[in-house]
Amino acid sequence: MYTVKQLSELAGVSVRTLHYYDEIGLLTPSQVGANSYRYYDEAAVLRLQQILFYREMGLELTQIKDVLDSPNFDLVMALKSHRAALQDKSERLQKLVETVDNTIKHLMEGTTMSKRQLFEAFSDETQKDYEREARLQYGPDNVNASIKRWNSYTQAQREAIGHEGNAVYNDLVDAIEAGKSPLDAEVQAILERWHNHLRYFYEPNLDILRNLGETYVSSPDFRKNFDKIDPRLAEYMREGITQYVDELETAEIERMLADDAARKGEG
């Protein structure tokens, strides 16, 4: 059994936090002594571990309580899930460390480093930012369907998709550096690849595409990620996407008019 002070030191949380968890029914003491001291057994320690894991994943305390109090909650399965999530996070952090190391060598020792190496560690983190932003704009059902599609891919497929996406943004940066207008046919072709790349996650309609161009500039999360690549990229993409969507919209209207004319001719 652990006292509240001992558990506080063991878990690295404050005594006040443990008292608060008791107040809201998230983590109650296993036993309260005659002196009103709180004591916690192994089951309580394991429950606190779960609380901290779920907090690390970003869940609210009320959500954590619902999960842990569910009759279907399985501790072993939860631990396996946490392990998988932590492994993914560990791999992402390792990629960031490698990217930082390579960049330091590039800056201090003059080693050759491609743009892809500069950006390759950001794809997974960027995807999380996109998911959060998309939930606000397109609703949880659409986003959950997109996440389900993403989770259906193998790790090799995800890496290939990530490389493809990085190549799109690298080519856009190259176009900026070459002084090309976002309205140029060559840049519009890159944006067509960007459009097709989005289909790995969901099928974007014209309204979504147009809105993405605005969101890349106005959303702090998106802007932060684009600025890591090139501070000019967000506005450059917005201008190019506007042109790209206008042309798709015009083509769609012309197709609809042609279909209407064909039907009238048949009549």
Image (tube, rainbow, N blue to C red):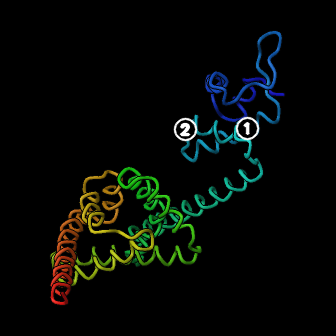
- The residue closer to the viewer here, 152 or 23, is 152
**Circle 1: element type:** helix
What is the C-alpha distance between the residues marked 2 and 1? 15 Å
The quarter of the picture where the N terminus appears is top right
Residue under label 2? 60
- The residue closer to the viewer here, 115 or 188, is 188
Please, what is the three-letter code of the amino acid marked with disc 2? Glu
- The residue closer to the viewer here, 20 or 70, is 70
Question: From where the camera sits, is residue 9 visible?
Answer: yes
| Label number found at residue 47 | 1
Q: Position of residue 139 (x, y in %)?
A: 41, 53
In the picture shown, does residue 30 fall above or below 111? Answer: above
Residue 226: image quadrant is: bottom left
Residue farthest toward the top in the current orientation of the protein: 35
Question: From where the camera sits, is residue 180 visible?
Answer: no
In the picture shown, does residue 61 fall above or below 154? Answer: above
In the picture shown, does residue 98 fall above or below 163? Answer: above
| Label number found at residue 95 | none
